[in-house]
Image (cartoon, coloured by chain):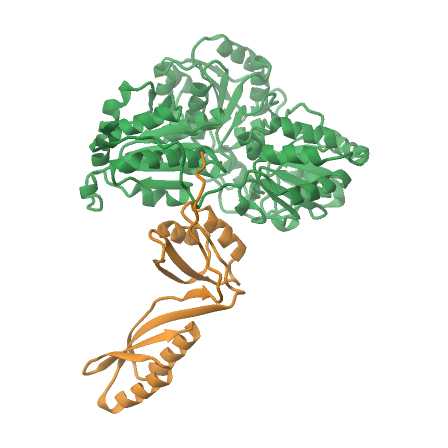
Chain colours: A green, B orange
Amino acid sequence: MRMTGAQMVCEALVAEGVRDVFGLPGGAIMPLYDVLPQYPIRHILVRHEQGAAHMADGYGRATNNVGVCMATSGPGAINLVVGLATAQMDSAPVVAITANVATSVIGSDAFQEADITGITIPVTKQNFLVRSPKDLPRVLREAFHLARSGRPGAVLVDIPKDVLTGEADFHYPEKVDLPGYNPTLRGNMVQIRKAARLIEHAQRPVIIAGHGVLIAQAWDELVALAERMTIPVANTLLGISNFPTAHPLFLGMLGMHGTATACYAVDQSDLVIGIGIRFDDRAMGKFSAFAPRAKIIHIDIDPAEIGKNVRTDVPIVGDAKLVLQALLQELKEPVDRTPWLNQIREWQRLYPLPSSEKVPGELTTPDVIRAVYEATDGDCSVVTDVGQHQMFVAQRFPFRRANTHFSSGGLGTMGYALPAAIGVQIARPHETVWCFAGDGGFQMVMQELAVVVAERLPLKIALVNNCYLGMVRQWQELFYRGNYVAVDLSPGTPDFQKIAEAYGIAAWRVTERADALPAVRAAMAHPGPALIEFLVRPDENVFPMVVPGTSLAEVIVNEAHAGRHDGKPAGGVQPRPEPVPVPGLRG
Amino acid sequence: MFNRVLSLFRCRGFAVESLAIGHTETPNIMRLTIVVDGSKTAVEQVVKQLYKIIEVRKVSDVTEDETVRRELALIKVASKPSTRSEIIQLVDIYRARIVDVAVNSLIVEVTGTPDKVDSMINVLRGFGIKELVRTGVVAMVRGPQVAYEEKVRELSA
């Protein structure tokens, strides 16, 4: 059928099952917006293109299908970049459609021209500049296939204005022809058998389960493996919610602000089973001292992650679900692991998550998290921003259902939570979605409150306000002699309650611990969107902490130990007396 | 496509010594010959990361293979009537060629292994090198096997 490039884009979106797209129009993309209303696609008008990319990211993660964002040429497209980089780092399936100036003027510095394919090469899985309408069906088919298959990621399709208005025959290809792209899904059976024997015989095994488990929807297989083989499970940040938090084999999050037990268990283990993880520096501590006594089984769909950061004894490239299914078939009876589990219980008893209160009864971030959990009974999706509140939620929120935790892990993008939560809420219209954000990250994107109102989303927002860039402040306290530079946000901090109300969003302010739960209950009872500003202790710190450059064994279990540097973790390893200063971390 | 390759080497800090790009016997398939410093770069990571580029069909690490390796250089050398015959003699020894003659200069074309090209350049340096361009090395494994063969493929859904 003959049609314009703009119509082809819409036809392709419909063919790919896309019901919602996030975007903001401008000159070059107007031909596409001109025809968009003729198709059964809901367009969510954002207030800044960064928001569109994060919304598509949240939508993509929540649906395990592709989230789509759209922007015009030049500034519109460039505003997507941080969102695309965030999605790509966290393997979130996103397709960005951008318009560009007409092919005849590309390269002439035309008005609102930018080389967006050049700009996004390092932050996308693949990108395309489409030079003719006849290429559009193939390119769009490939874009969606690449975004959602294998290790998912961000794909950008840049379409010059004359390609949107030009005509060609449209046949949407059923199959793609990508000879250089063949993700390995089924693991090598020789390696799987080798892994099975190691798993049966290990005395102190531990599983580190990551985002790959959620992407592959392999949570049932993960629980089966852990239970049948009696193996404790730690999560990476992005793996959170792939294993029930309340499960007796759950160790909590691993890494820089993970639980002491997870850190000690990995350090002391004789077999680490990494499933759908990339052994990221924030989760593993110092690579050279990582799990020194352990053999390492690494299951991941991306062969480039195997052996990248840590040594691997048994590499298994494949889809986490298919590999775990094959592994479960192979496994026989494990050895008795009672002594190992007893050791873990002992660590859990000795090193619980510390309270972050200094003055008894004051409102702290963990109180906020507890209030949301109690009011929701854990039956909600949680989206966090980046910084202290993100770590507190990752440590403490009891997740009961799979794929209900969303955060920017790899890139650590402040400003992620509000737009991503909008994407999650649109993907899950009948679920409760709680957005946790700090005052720093929230102020980067709070214009998207307009979208919450315009789309009538029942989103609930917990704004954890300490009037600081809290994580940076914590690092300045610990590693820069308490030299607080450019972290105090209190001059200029707005009245967030009034801001929410100005948008037409019901809002509360909570300053006392006793008021937290009633406020959350009130927000839940309110049928529309709601925002609660929690004024928490300004100088709260997140512990435990694995100081950069140190190993998991050196985890500082609580604030008292950090101050005096005399923590005595198991294994007899002392925390470093002088933490190595590391260049400032944002958020 | 090679934008992505170059970007990859830059982003990941892989140490590139030379890079040569050209067409192959198959339409639409380009071949890149890249020399990386293996002492500064994990070659296995380079290969794996290159495979992540969607258009990349085949990556061969030929470090340990028996290969034919060749590079071409054009060297513009200063010359006077008194030095010209000496230059020509040296060029002959290297089985290189004079491809252009001007009043005060010659262009020498030399082909060979990078070592031979280096050596030719060093020998000519004494006369005064006015301009130099090298293609970067290309390589081919000896024997009947080929690096990449286009096959009939099944399409994926």
For this orientation, the residue located farthest to the bottom is B82
Question: Residue A367 lies in what quarter of the image?
Answer: top right
Q: Position of residue A2 (x, y in %)?
A: 23, 28
**Residue A548 visible in the snapshot:** yes
Marks counted in the figure total 0
* Residue under the image location 78 percent in, 35 percent down: A334
Considering depth in this image, is A80 or A571 the residue closer to the camera? A80
Q: Is residue B5 left or right of residue A276?
A: left
Considering depth in this image, is A56 or A174 the residue closer to the camera? A174
Q: Is residue A345 left or right of residue B53?
A: right
Question: Residue A453 lies in what quarter of the image?
Answer: top left
* Residue under the image location 37 percent in, 22 percent down: A20
Q: Position of residue A247 (x, y in %)?
A: 68, 24
In which quadrant of the rendered image does the C terminus of chain B lie?
top left
Q: Position of residue A255 (x, y in %)?
A: 61, 38
Q: Is residue B78 left or right of residue A338?
A: left
**Residue A358 visible in the snapshot:** no
* Residue under the image location 20 percent in, 33 percent down: A166
Q: Is residue B136 above or below residue A418?
A: below
Considering depth in this image, is A283 or A221 the residue closer to the camera? A221
Q: Is residue A264 above or below residue A390?
A: below
* Residue under the image location 30 percent in, 20 percent down: A39
Q: Is residue A59 left or right of residue A390?
A: left
Q: Position of residue B81 (x, y in %)?
A: 22, 90
Q: Is residue A214 above or below residue A460?
A: below
Considering depth in this image, is A153 or A51 the residue closer to the camera? A153
